[in-house]
Image: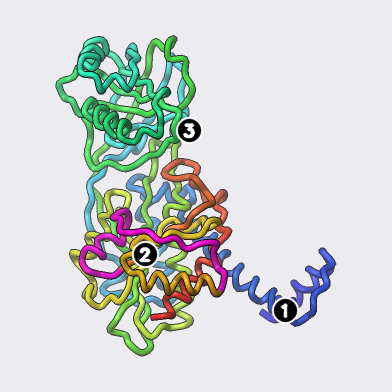
Amino acid sequence: MINNTVKFVALLKKRIKIRLPGTWLFIWLTVAAASGQDVEYARRVIGTLASPRFAGRGYVAGGNDRAAAYLKRQYARWGLKPFGKDYEQPFEITVNTFPSTMRLLVDGVELVPGEDYLVDPASPSFSGTHEVYVADRQDLLDDSRLATIKENAAGKILILDGSGLKTDDGERIKQLKQAVGLLKQDTLSPIVAVIEYSPAKLTWYISKTQAARPAFTVKKELDLKNVRKIGIRVKARMTTCETRNIVGYIEGAARPDSFLTITAHYDHIGMMGKKACFHGANDNASGVSMLLNLAKHFAAHPHKYSIAFIATSAEEVGIVGAKYFTEHPLFELERIRFLVNFDMAGGGDEGIQVVNGSVYQELFDRMTKINGEKHYLPEVRIRGESCNSDHCPFYQKGVPAFFIYTLGGSSAYHDIHDRSETLPLTAFANYFRLAVDFFNTF
């Protein structure tokens, strides 16, 4: 380290001709090197998990299985102990997948999957070309107009124009989502397919069921008055498969029977056909990289308590992996002193948000005090209860827990743009230091 630092000092002086007292420059470079090392490993983890080979860590093309195997290798690398055989806690899930054909053509012109459109996660397989009928999406809330729409769209593909909908009308949007959902599930309707036309951001999910008819969301600008026919070619497959939580621990130096616990989900939403990959760099390869960085650190600096590391699967399917662990725990949940769940750790330009911060006010104040003294992050914001990630099943079982996510940075979420090469990680090193300092207060 010293030789490398001296070489880097010489290079730095030569290239940018700075003049700082040698001792202070050495200290600054040592800190920077340590910081860079954390980010370097984080980038490698994220780059691997969010690479095309891992196919979005979903349930086609073996992506989820490859991610699990990679995590086991990292656990072994840092010397984590398994609770049972290997590091695996297997369980089964059933999801709707799109393993191959995915085409949407407007008057013979093919749209780009993921960029121009999304298939509804619950869509069944379908192949055919049909005439269209265009209606205002807001007309679905008027019973008489809805009846007219169903009559005129019989045997056709219904395009629901949502371009004029005000995005700040939350209640109306909720009602319209319910109305569109009923159309998709109506087994008696003669409508062939449903297309929602909207300029809003494309955001995809996973479904555990299939609907009665195919549906899409289209963002690409179209002249709806002149659209005549739409062609659909979609292959969907309901899949029951085995996935697994990856669980290991570092034994505590003084109180090995009690645990601090770190969780992060490694799954994402996978592939939409052969071309559209949802890489999930921020959500949640970044959280996994934080988990692995903390495993690496505490392997070299054992805590007085044991630390369990739970990389969960199937969070995107409905927090299934975390629920499974709490129902089939590999160690007694009562032994967990505190749990922190890391999800979307790749930003931080504006700080972090702490879910359950107001529930465990003393611990939140402890974290904000550390941050205030060491100026790690711009802000540590408080939030109340929210069952929106893997901390929730533990919390519902009586385990004290925080869920923390970063603020600012990348706006990509559940789309094809959440990629490792565009994830800034500008605050990752300081976020990591805050996490280490916080865990060391226990």
Picture layout, residue 372 above or below residue 50? below
Please state which of the two labelled residues, at mark 1 or mark 2, is closer to the viewer.
2
Query: Please, what is the dominant secondary structure of the magenta stretch?
Result: loop
Quote the CA–CA distance across marks 2 and 3: 37 Å
Lower position in the chain sequence, tag 1 or tag 2:
1
Quote the CA–CA distance across marks 3 and 1: 48 Å
Lower position in the chain sequence, tag 2 or tag 3:
3
| Disc 3: which residue | 115
- Please provide percent x and percent y for residue 434: 49, 71
Picture layout, residue 135 above or below residue 215? above
Specify whether residue 108 is painted magenta.
no
Name the amino acid type tagged 1: Phe
- Residue 26's tag is 1
Magenta residues span 374-400
Please state which of the two labelled residues, at mark 2 or mark 3, is closer to the viewer.
2
In the picture, the quarter occupied by the N terminus is bottom right
Q: Nearer the viewer, residue 177 or 158?
A: 177
Q: Residues within 10 Å of mark 3 (few under 14, many from 20)?
A: some
Name the amino acid type tagged 2: Gly
Q: Say which element carries label 2.
A: loop
The structure residue drawn at horizontal position 79% and vertical position 79%, both measured from the top left corner, is: 21
